[in-house]
Amino acid sequence: MNSRTIAVPVLALAIGAGAATVVLTLANGHTAANSSPTASQRAVGQAPSSTGGTGTADGGMMGAAGGMGGGGSDIARGASGGLVPAARMQALAARAAQGVTKSHGTLSYHTKAVTLVALGAPGNRPGMYWQIDGVDGPKGPTVSVPAGATVTVDFADGDPGHPHGFELTTAAPPYGRMAMGEGSIASPGAFVMPVPPPKGNLWYAATVTFRAPAPGTYHIICPVPGHAQQGMWATLVVR
């Protein structure tokens, strides 16, 4: 892996009371820290402004369209730090699940604008796992989207004991401890820095939007060391 590789190992994770800071060690030995959202990764409660920065979304919602596989974030504005009520995230996941075709553990989306509600180990069962649009399993569901789709991911960490992030990777399982360094990010913007565990019934959340990569099979992992190795991965098929 050279210094231009997008997916780099996360070697240190320092989480404060209201923010997550990830220190990345690059292949060239240099380090970089990131504790604030980028243009493609916004804390809940922020939306792009007309001047290109971030602003507060009017009407209490982010994006122009809702869930149901129709594209656009439908997370209500949260408190400072991207905190959203757990019940709100679970309701969005249940709503999104009504707009997809389910067959043998595969969630198929048929529009060019897709919204996924991806929850990190939300407490339904022990262990590391993904729940996507209300569906989880030992290795997460398989998500199928059409080529060229714009994918919006409403992500939240529902695990009381662990920080979690989101990455769409070119690497396939089985994964080692440093799964985030085994491949590259499959599409620009398809990454959420790890966020802190929940604060009671409030979950840390963020929204990212990216273009589906070329047709093929990719995987959704948590980039925190050891989590994908323990089973926190799901599959994305671009058809």
Image (cartoon, rainbow, N blue to C red):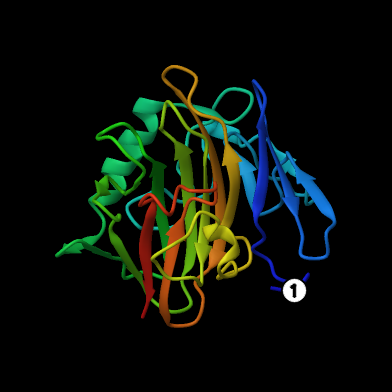
From the viewer's side, name the closer residue of 152 and 29: 29
Q: Amino acid at mark 1?
A: Asn
Residue at 42% in and 26% down: 160
Instruction: Provide residue 183's location: percent of width, then percent of height.
Output: 56, 70
Instruction: Provide residue 103's location: percent of width, then percent of height.
Output: 15, 65
User: Please, which residue is most extreme toward the top here?
Assistant: 200
From the viewer's side, name the closer residue of 174 and 218: 174
Q: Say above or below: 4 vs 82.
A: below
Q: Say above or below: 148 vs 196.
A: below
Instruction: Provide residue 134's location: percent of width, then percent of height.
Output: 27, 45
Quadrant including the N terminus: bottom right
Quadrant including the C terminus: bottom left
Residue designated by label 1: 2
User: Please, which residue is most extreme toward the left here?
Assistant: 104
From the viewer's side, name the closer residue of 224 and 237: 224
Q: Say above or below: 199 vs 34.
A: above
Q: How many marks?
A: 1
Disc 1: CA contacts within 10 A as few (<14), some (14-19) or many (>=20):
few
